Image (cartoon, grey):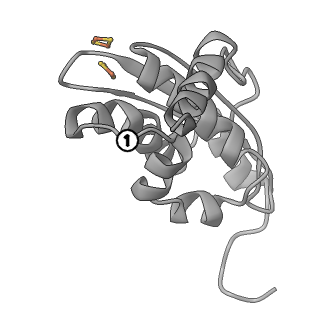
Amino acid sequence: PNEQDIYEEHVLDHYEDPYHRGELATATHADEGKNPLCGDVIQVMLRLDRDGKIEEAWFDGEGCVISQASASMLIEAIEGKTVEEAKEFTANEMLDLFGPQLTPNRQKCCLLSWRVLQSALHAPIDDSADDDDAGPSFGGPSL
Ligand code: FES
Ligand code: FES
């Protein structure tokens, strides 16, 4: 019967002592999103390496315990994964990672960072566009 309590403590731990909350100055990809129901905001910042791995992940934002704690859990979970693995991480897996059962509106809080992560994976920061001149072009599937 205490399982719910354990989850809630886990949630509060992430809220009070979040993983990688702040600014990632070396981010290569970043995006921001808002929960339209309440206005709460999450930013996700990623540094992807050339092999398509998430070397480092950070978040920042303002909002409720669920949105902020779930962001911390997600950032911790996806750091070190490949971009493909992060793209395949589903909304249901996010809800499972969070733990406690949530009403549909609260699920939106929990999925805010997940949505922003998915868009950040497709949102390179502009000044990395210089790389296009330097590197070999991605002509095809060879190598
Ligand atoms: Fe109520 Fe986010 S709007 S806590
Ligand atoms: Fe705003 Fe949870 S109440 S994201």
Which class describes the residues within 10 Å of circle 1: few (<14), some (14-19), or many (20+)?
Answer: few
Residue identifier under label 1: 101
The residue at 43%/24% (across/down) is 66
Determine whether, in the image, residue 86 is placed left or right of residue 98.
right
Is 59 situated above or below 143?
Answer: above
Which of the two residues, 45 or 141, is positioned nearer the viewer here?
A: 45
Which of the two residues, 26 or 43, is positioned nearer the viewer here?
A: 43
Measured from the top left, where is residue 133 in percent x and y?
71, 53
What is the secondary structure assignment of the residue under circle 1?
loop
The residue at 46%/43% (across/down) is 114
Q: Residue furthest bottom?
A: 142
Measured from the top left, where is residue 122 in percent x and y?
50, 51
Which of the two residues, 19 or 143, is positioned nearer the viewer here?
A: 19
The quarter of the image holding the C terminus is bottom right
* Amino acid bearing label 1: Gln
Is 121 situated above or below 47?
Answer: below
